[in-house]
Amino acid sequence: MTRMSVFSSPLLLGFDHIERVLDRVNKSSAEGYPPYNIEQTGEHALRITLAVAGFAEEELSVTVEDNQLVVRGRNTDDGADRVFLHRGIAARQFSRSFVIAEGIEVKTAGLDNGLLHIDLQRPVPESKVTEIKISSVRSGKPKPQMIDMEHKAVE
């Protein structure tokens, strides 16, 4: 069965990249670990905070890959030499991704008391006005003709 897309209309040309972004968002929304918050810290600023208790700074990585902010954690302490009576603190490796808009910049990432704070900034776009030159069409040029199905010129 073929999946119908909102962007499959012939009137919506060049929007296939938006469909791919929506697919990525659907896949990443199913992830539940680690928990996170997203807050607006300014008119053009955001902060993503992930709860990464038990991870050291060198066990975390933050990268931007194809308009996706990817946070990875690889815990090197597997606790093999310890005996747990109860293990409720998740210390498994993870990869959490966030789709970010074109132009969003990752400014800083910092670890504080088990919380990884990632600050994002959207630069204010400059207003851009482009003037299109209108050229006159010579009246001496032949008019384009419409052609019917039998390839005969129609006046």
Image (cartoon, rainbow, N blue to C red):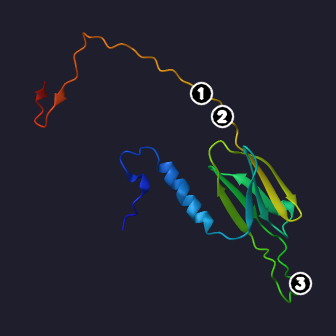
Residue 25 as seen in the image, left or right of residue 106? left
Task: Please report contact status of discs 3 and 2: CB closer than 8 Å, yes or no.
Answer: no
Residue 55 as seen in the image, left or right of residue 44? right
* Mark 1, other Cα within 10 Å: few <14 / some 14–19 / many ≥20: few
Specify the amino acid type for callout 1. Lys
Counting residues from the N terminus, which is met first, the one under dot 3 or under dot 2? Answer: 3
Q: x, y (%) of residue 64?
A: 69, 51
Look at the image and tell me in which quarter the N terminus lies.
bottom left
Specify the amino acid type for callout 3. Arg
Q: Which residue is at 40% across, 63% downward?
A: 3
Q: Which residue is at 70% across, 38% downward?
A: 123
Looking at the image, which residue sits at the far front?
A: 43
Query: What separation in Å lies between label 3 and label 2 (alpha carbons)?
Result: 54 Å
Query: What separation in Å lies between label 2 and label 1 (alpha carbons)?
Result: 9 Å
Element at badge 2?
Answer: loop
Task: Please report contact status of discs 2 and 1: CB closer than 8 Å, yes or no.
Answer: yes
* Mark 3, other Cα within 10 Å: few <14 / some 14–19 / many ≥20: few
Give the residue at mark 3.
Answer: 82
Give the residue at mark 2.
Answer: 125
Counting residues from the N terminus, which is met first, the one under dot 3 or under dot 1? Answer: 3
Give the residue at mark 1.
Answer: 128
Between marks 3 and 1 in the image, the one whose residue lies nearer the viewer? 1
Q: Residue 67 carries which label?
A: none
Specify the amino acid type for callout 2. Pro
Q: Which residue is at 85% across, 73% downward?
A: 77
